[in-house]
Image (spheres, rainbow, N blue to C red):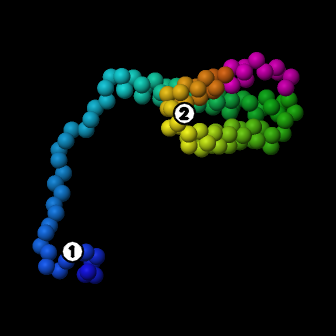
Amino acid sequence: MDPLGDTRPAGSNLMVVCVPTEAEPARMSRRQTLTLVSMASVNFSSMLCYSILGPFFPNEAVKKGASQTVVGLIFGCYAICNLIGSLVLGRYIVQIGTKFMLIAGLFVSAGCTIMFGPCSPEI
């Protein structure tokens, strides 16, 4: 073995040359494109629902007697639950199925968002 890390025997003159081919990248079908666009728009809409809370929720919570620490904990709980849920459910996504996981997650998210709406202002 020489100092440059060549592991070929000393008398070997074999040289391997890799030539890149000019293959055209595979294109997505119309159905795949529509699926990608719909998933991206659903994800965008879901994140939009939670980001709408940022500008007005802290002021409303303080008016109702919550401290800034509690407001921070409320927003932090969402992030930590999202992280833990992603790690746990991501481990079992192969067994559960990606389609079911996506649809179930959308329904859970929609249900939580809808339940947030009728919360009484006295809280």
Q: Position of residue 3 (x, y in %)?
A: 28, 81
User: Where does the image place residue 71, in percent across and percent down from the top left?
Assistant: 77, 38
Amino acid carrying label 1: it is Arg
Q: Which numbered disc, 1 or 2, marks the residue that appears first in the sequence?
A: 1
- Span colored in magenta: 112-123
Residue at horizontal 63%, vertical 39%? 85
The residue shown at (13%, 79%) is 11
Q: x and y percent of residue 5 in the render?
A: 28, 76
- Quarter of the figure that contains the C terminus: top right
* Extreme-left residue of the structure: 13
66 to the left or right of 112: right
The quadrant of the rendering that contains the N terminus is bottom left
Which sits in the foreground, 17 or 98?
98
Under tag 1, what secondary structure?
loop
Which residue of the protein is positioned furthest toward the top in this rendering?
118
Residue designated by label 2: 96
Q: Which residue is mark 1?
A: 8
Give the vertical position of 18 relative to 101 (above or below): below
Q: Residue at x 74, y 30 (%)?
A: 57
Around disc 1, counting alpha carbons within 10 Å, would you say few (fewer than 14), some (14 to 19), or many (20 or more)? few
Q: Nearer the viewer, residue 34 or 15?
A: 15
* Label 2: element kind: helix
Which kind of residue does numbered mark 2 sit on?
A: Ile
Residue at 50 percent across and 32 percent down: it is 98
Residue 114 among magenta residues:
yes
